[in-house]
Image (spheres, rainbow, N blue to C red):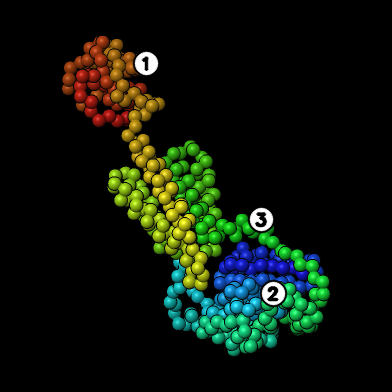
Amino acid sequence: MVRIDIDGEIEPVLAQYVENGIARAADEHASLILIRMDTPGGLGESMRAIIQAILGSQVPVAIYVEPSGARAASAGFFILESADVAAMSPGTETGAASPLLEVGGFPVQVDPTLRKKIMQDTLAFLRSYVSRRGRNVPLAEKAVTDATAYSAKEALNDHLIDLIADSESSLIAELNGRAITRFDGSQTTLRLDHPVIVDYQMSARERFLSRIVQPDAFFILLIVGLLGLYVEFTHPGLVAPGVIGGICLILALFAMHMLPVTMTGFLLILLAIALFVLEAKFSGHGILGIGGVISLVLGAVLLVRSPMTTGGVGLGVAFGVALPFAVFFILIARLVLRSRSWKPETGTESLVGALGDVTEPIGTAKGMVFVNGELWRATRAETDAIAGPIPKGARVRVVKVKGLTLYVEPADTPPAPTRAG
């Protein structure tokens, strides 16, 4: 017997895990697939993939909603009804399976005709296998049309599930010797006298991808990605921040396709970054920085939010990431802005402002100056062109560098704004 766990929101990685587990059970000629389930629902396409795998399974599938307090809500209700044997433990619930159309993670009002099409398609899909399982089709439809939820006892009395079991061992005992009708109409009897239970675990790849799509991990990847790219753009050549940031941002974009990400959260995060830059450029006495932290925390909290679940970025993670990110980002931004006013240390631009000695007089024709141990062709700066010639031995200051010619002025002239060109 192969045991599979559905714990959490129904999403593509989980669907792939269930499909692989069902295929593994068929390869090993297992007597039963036991799926333990506790889910608030999830994505419709992932739900359909799981149901298709269950309906086409060569091995009988029993779904058990446990432990007490667990639920098979929304998409979980559809999956529960698709099983060869549907079971629940006391104190569990199922139902509330009305489809929701979302944009940016929030439900939206749609055209009545479109909503009717979505509802009818969902009901037809549910009827297509609930009736063949011999369960109560009208009440199953009410879970969709009226969002009706059922306790374990109500679901059993209304023929939506097959049995209630106090524990997994008691469920296996009740299933032993039970005759069931498969989805294709064939009859089989479950033989579970001395079952050997094999837990099918997620692969390392599936665990990694499943962790990425968790809201907290997604938020951290997004922030690290943005910060890494920012550091690389402002300090070209460091390479490592750009590589790390790029990888993190790609993983975050991958997770976005699996999470109900809200545009409001994104805009608040972008606003936070803008406030951090302004705090670094214009001293706001910390007000802009504090506003950025608040905006970042609110953006994190709103970034992933689904009406079906309680999924979202935790406040602890939001504050834990926002505060160090704000400090680091503002410090980096201040260094970048301050570096723009630094005098170049290499190249011809480093000569601007340097002092030198005239070795050949500078008049209407170019002369020669000795600067930083080198002889340069020199002429008077445009701002000093109307003055007389500069004699040999005079002290001069470099105002501008153009090609291989220095533009100079007498050293006793008050320094003017310098530039390289």
The residue that mark 2 highlights is 167
Mark 3 vs mark 1: in front: 3
**Rendered location of residue 399, percent (x, y):** 27, 25
Question: In the rendered view, does 375 fall on the left or right side of 50?
Answer: left
Q: In this view of the protein, which residue sits in the foreground, 347 or 51?
A: 51
Question: In the rendered view, does 226 fall on the left or right side of 178?
Answer: left
Residue plotted at (54% across, 63% down): 258
Dot 2 or dot 3: first in sequence order is 2
Q: CA distance from mark 2 to mark 3?
A: 29 Å
Q: Amino acid at mark 1?
A: Glu
**Rendered location of residue 334, percent (x, y):** 36, 41
Residue plotted at (34% across, 23% down): 351
Mark 2 vs mark 3: in front: 2
Is 294 above or below relative to 70? Answer: above
**Rendered location of residue 146, percent (x, y):** 51, 84
* Callout 2 crowding tier (Cα within 10 Å): few <14, some 14–19, many ≥20: some
Mark 2 vs mark 1: in front: 2
Question: In the rendered view, does 364 fall on the left or right side of 138?
Answer: left
* Callout 1 crowding tier (Cα within 10 Å): few <14, some 14–19, many ≥20: few
Dot 3 or dot 1: first in sequence order is 3
Is 212 above or below relative to 137? Answer: above
**Which label belongs to residue 374?**
1
